[in-house]
Every structure is written in structure tokens, then in C-alpha cells.
Image (cartoon, rainbow, N blue to C red):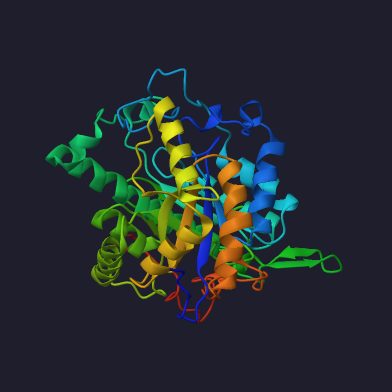
Amino acid sequence: MSTTDTSGRPLHLAVALDGAGWHPAAWREPGTRPGELFTARYWADLARTAERGLFDLLTIEDGFGLQSGDHLHGAQRRTDRVQGRLDASLVAAFLAPLTSRIGLVPTVTTTHTEPFHVASALATLDHDSHGRAGWRVQTSVRADEAAHFGRRTVPGLRRADLDTPAGRALVAELFGEAADVVEVVRRLWDSWEDDAEIRDALTGRFVDRDKLHRVDFAGEHFGVAGPSIVPRPPQGQPLVLSLAHGYEPALLAARVGDVVATTPHDADDAARIVAQVRSAEAAAGRTAPPLRILGDVVVVLADTQRVARERLARLDALDPLSSDAPILATTPAGLADTLLSWRRAGLDGYRLRPAVLPTDLDAVVDGLVPELQSRGAFRTAYGETTLRERFGLPRPASRYAAGAGSAVVPTFSGATA
């Protein structure tokens, strides 16, 4: 039976783009474009399709190592899977002038990355997109990725090792570093006040020096003086999103994020995860608006459930999909039923992972979106201009402006000035 949305709040919908799709055998499916994965045209087509579907945002996967499937200790030496990807932040940059409303959220890894560079790149993206930039924060636990930089060593852990004392210590270290990185990036975004640029040719004054501020961050992992070289982003603070599989990553999101993506496997699990996120917010002493919580799901869509399941079985026969998120092989109406049912647990929306691109993205836009619209659960046109506005988040004042408060800007409690 179809479920009608009675919450009065439209769902937030994001799409997670990765190569030929989230299924490892996706590139072998008819209709995919494996020869174009490293071209601007391919990514532009996906972004325009997602924007046609009125998605809140798209995320672009990235990392410092070749794709490794479920292996954390290093890349697999397989030749039957997509290997390699374009730089996510640069993909987002060239998508900015080719789109007009959808949010652009590249994945940028905090481990091994200089926060000054991150702040500059994402502030530039926000200017290029007129306030549609975000950042998917990610850490790196892989030894082969650390070896690319040579500044530190990371033990080669397997996924099963993460719940050992050594694994927990490493995760705590990397998440602590990530919190510092986001904190200093946020400070750099604030380091120019909104009216710091004067641009008065008659007086010869381009900038008000008193409205550019040093951030003087000194932490365990690095120190940054500031100010940024990029004027304050149009949003003030571009949207910060992270993926949380458990309490520690939920705590990171509560400390420094705006949106958290989670992986519930049923309605009861969604309720448990929402409670976990709210508990993490309380533990972090969060004073910013509550985190917007999205559920991640891998989607395989077809006109009938039988055909969808047969398509998934055919893909799995080539190369089985191992997923942290639930895999839903169904019809657009069946997917809408599930999403609206789970939403009652307190989810604000979903980040959909198309199993095959562009096939399942097209099915979402042409099937799921109209289904949700007919039930009053999704927008019929874009309204808000910036990504923060779309999530109901205020534009914060620079923390360095005279008389400004920073209550709406999440900060890491361990940061030092």
C-alpha cells in the first residue's frame, strides 16, 4: 500500500556519485559509459540530470588511493573493477557554471591534507557556484595512502581490526585531527568579514585591513596563522557533511558538521541511529542548529520488483556488492514507501547511491521523484538559492566581526586559540 507523507516537511534528497555507480559490476552493464568516466561531459550529464530531479545536492566520492572495495589496508590488485577517479573538488568546480541550483559537495579527505588549501578551494567553489558549495569530510585509515605523502605512517588495518585497541586509538586520532581541520577551515572562512572588500578606485582602497583577521590556530596536529587568501564565501560557512557509521563519527559530526549521512537498515535501526546522533550532540555540547540526518541507501530500480531483483542478481553474479548501506532493489513506488516509512523515525531525508550510472539515476529522477511529489513529500520546484538556506540553516556572521556571536557555527571544543 502506498504511503502518503503527512509530516508537512519535504524530504531532503541527495545523490552520491561515484564512477559508473556503486555496484562494482556497474561498468559492465548496457547503457553505462565506462569510456567517458574521466571526461567533463560525463559528470556534467549526471549533474544536470540530478538538477532536473530537484535534488538538494550531489556528493562526489574521492580518496588518496585507488578503489579498494571493502579493504582498508590497501588497494586490491583487481583489473575487473573501475580504478581511478578525477579530483572531486575540481569536478565540482567545473560543474558550478554548468548548473544553477543543485548543491555541489565534493569529498575532501582531512588526513594528509593542509586545511589552508581545503579552505581556499571550497571558498572558491562557493563563489563559483553563488552559494551552493559544501564539503563531505572524510578521513583516511589506509597505509598505502599515507605512503603517498611520507609525513606519517599509518598501520595497515583491516576492517575487522577497527574494534581492537589499536584500531580504536587510530580512529580516535584521525577523528580528532579531522575535527581540528574542520575547525580551522571554518575559522579561515570567517577570517574575512563580509564587508572587508572596499573596491574604491577613487580612494585607492581595495580592502579594509582591519576586517581581515588572523585565526592563530594552534593544535596538536598543526598550526595555522591566517587570514585566508579567499574573501568570505557567499554562504559565510559552506555546508559541512560527513558519514557516520557509529558513535565516534556521529560525535565528529555533532562537533563540526551541519548534515550527517547514516546507514540505517530498517525503521527500527533508523530510530536507533537518530537517537545516537542526538546523544552525540548533547555530549558535544552542540549549540548550533540540530544536525540534519540523512539515510544512505543503494538503489536498483525497475518497473517491477521482480525485474529490479533480477538485475541486482545479474550484477552480483558478475561481482557481488558488499555495502555498508542497505541495498533496495524495487520499484519507484516501493522505494517511496520505504523512504517515507523510515522517515517517521526522525530522518530528514536520504542520500541515494545509484547502483548503476546513469541508469538508476535516471530511474530516480523520472520515477521516484514524481512518486514522492504526488504524495506531497518532495518539492516541485527549487525555492531557496543557497545550500544552507535549503537545509533551513541561517547564514552565520563572521566570528571575528565586532559584536558577532558564533553560536550558529559548530566549533571543536578541543581547539585552542
Mark count: 0
Query: Percent x, y for residue 136?
Result: 47, 51
Residue 246 placement, left or right of 111: left
Residue 104: name its quadrant: bottom right
**Residue 109 at least partly seen:** yes
Return the residue nearer the eye: 345 or 44.
Answer: 345
Q: Is residue 226 visible?
A: no
Residue shown at 51% from the left, 66% from the top: 12
What is the quadrant of residue 207 in the picture? bottom right
Residue that sits furthest to the left in the current view: 165
Nearest the viewer among 402 and 204 is: 402
Residue 281 vertical position relative to residue 351 in the rendered view, above or below? below
Q: Position of residue 326 (x, y in %)?
A: 36, 49
Residues 335 and 89: in front is 335
Position of 51 with respect to 303 (left or right) is right
Image quadrant in which the C terminus is located: bottom left
What residue is rendered at 74% in x and 50% in y? 98
Where is residue 56 drawn, in percent x and y? 57, 62
Find residue 346 and report its horizontal and vertical position in percent: 36, 72
Q: Is residue 77 above or below residue 22?
A: above
Q: Residue at x 55, y 67 (%)?
A: 372
